Image: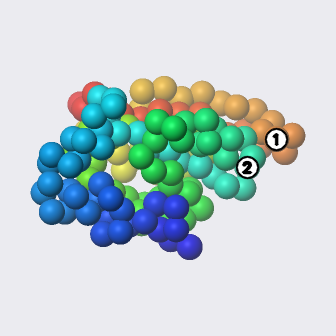
C-alpha cells in the first residue's frame, strides 16, 4: 500500500512540518546529523530488509521500493528535499537506484557511492548498495 511505510508528506512528520514552513522543527529532526537519512528497502529481499534495519536507528523513515518511488517523491518527498538537507541510502534493484538518483538530482543531490552485491540471499539476483545526498551540486 502506497504510503504505508513512508506516509506521504501530509501524513509524514517532516513533510507536514515543511508544508507549514516550520523550519525550527525540521532542524530539530535533523539535529543529530548534518542530513536527515531516508532509507529505501525492497521488502522482497531479506538482505535489503536487513540493510534497512541496520540503518534504522539513524533514519527518519524507510521507503518501500515496491510502493512506486517516483509517486512517493512527487507525492511530497520532493518538497521536503528542496527545503531540508536529506540523504538517502538503500540496497535495492538497479532500476530503483536509478529512480532515486534521478529524483534526488532534481534537488541537486548526487549519488555519493554505489556498489553491486551479487547473489543476494542465494537468489542469483544482484542488488545495488547506494547512498545519495550530502552535498548539493
> Horizontal and vertical percent for residue 8?
38, 66
Asked if residue 14 is positioned above or below residue 116 in the image, the reply reads below
Q: Is residue 18 left or right of residue 3?
A: left
Tag 2 and tag 1, C-beta contact below 8 Å: yes
Q: Residue at x 41, y 35 (%)?
A: 132
Name the colouring of the figure: rainbow
Asked if residue 10 is positioned above or below residue 109 in the image, the reply reads below
Is disc 2 surrounded by few (<14), some (14 to 19) or many (20+) residues within 10 Å? some
Helix, strand or loop status at disc 2: loop
Q: Is residue 110 left or right of residue 116?
A: left
Helix, strand or loop status at disc 1: helix
Label for residue 76?
A: none
> Horizontal and vertical percent for residue 38?
43, 45
Q: Residue at x 53, y 48 (%)?
A: 40
Asked if residue 82 is positioned above or below residue 113 in the image, the reply reads below
Q: Residue at x 36, y 50 (%)?
A: 103
Is disc 1 surrounded by few (<14), some (14 to 19) or many (20+) residues within 10 Å? few
Label for residue 121?
A: 1
Query: Residue 32 appears in which quarter of the rendering?
Result: top left
Query: Residue 84 appears in which quarter of the rendering?
Result: top left
Residue 69 vs residue 98, the one in the foreground: 69
Q: Residue beneath label 2, please? A: 45
Work out which residue is located at the far bottom of the displayed protein and give it: 1
Work out which residue is located at the far right of the displayed protein and give it: 122
Q: Quadrant of the N terminus?
A: bottom right
Specify which label sits upstream in the sequence, 2 or 1. Answer: 2
- Can I make out residue 66 in this image? yes
Q: CA distance from mark 2 to mark 1?
A: 7 Å
Amino acid at each position: 500500500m502506497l504510503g504505508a511505510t513512508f506516509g506521504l508528506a501530509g501524513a509524514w512528520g517532516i513533510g507536514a512540518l515543511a508544508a507549514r514552513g516550520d523550519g525550527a522543527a525540521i532542524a530539530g529532526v535533523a539535529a543529530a546529523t548534518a542530513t536527515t537519512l531516508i532509507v529505501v528497502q525492497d521488502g522482497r529481499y531479506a538482505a535489503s530488509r536487513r540493510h534497512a534495519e541496520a540503518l534504522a536507528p539513524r533514519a527518519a523513515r524507510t521507503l518501500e521500493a515496491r510502493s512506486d518511488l517516483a509517486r512517493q517523491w512527487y507525492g511530497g518527498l520532493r518538497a521536503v528535499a528542496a527545503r531540508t538537507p536529506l540523504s538517502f541510502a538503500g540496497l535495492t534493484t538497479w532500476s530503483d537506484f536509478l529512480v532515486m538518483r534521478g529524483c534526488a538530482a532534481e534537488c541537486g543531490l548526487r549519488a555519493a557511492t554505489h556498489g553491486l552485491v551479487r547473489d543476494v540471499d542465494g537468489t542469483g539476483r544482484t542488488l545495488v548498495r547506494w547512498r545519495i545526498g550530502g552535498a548539493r551540486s
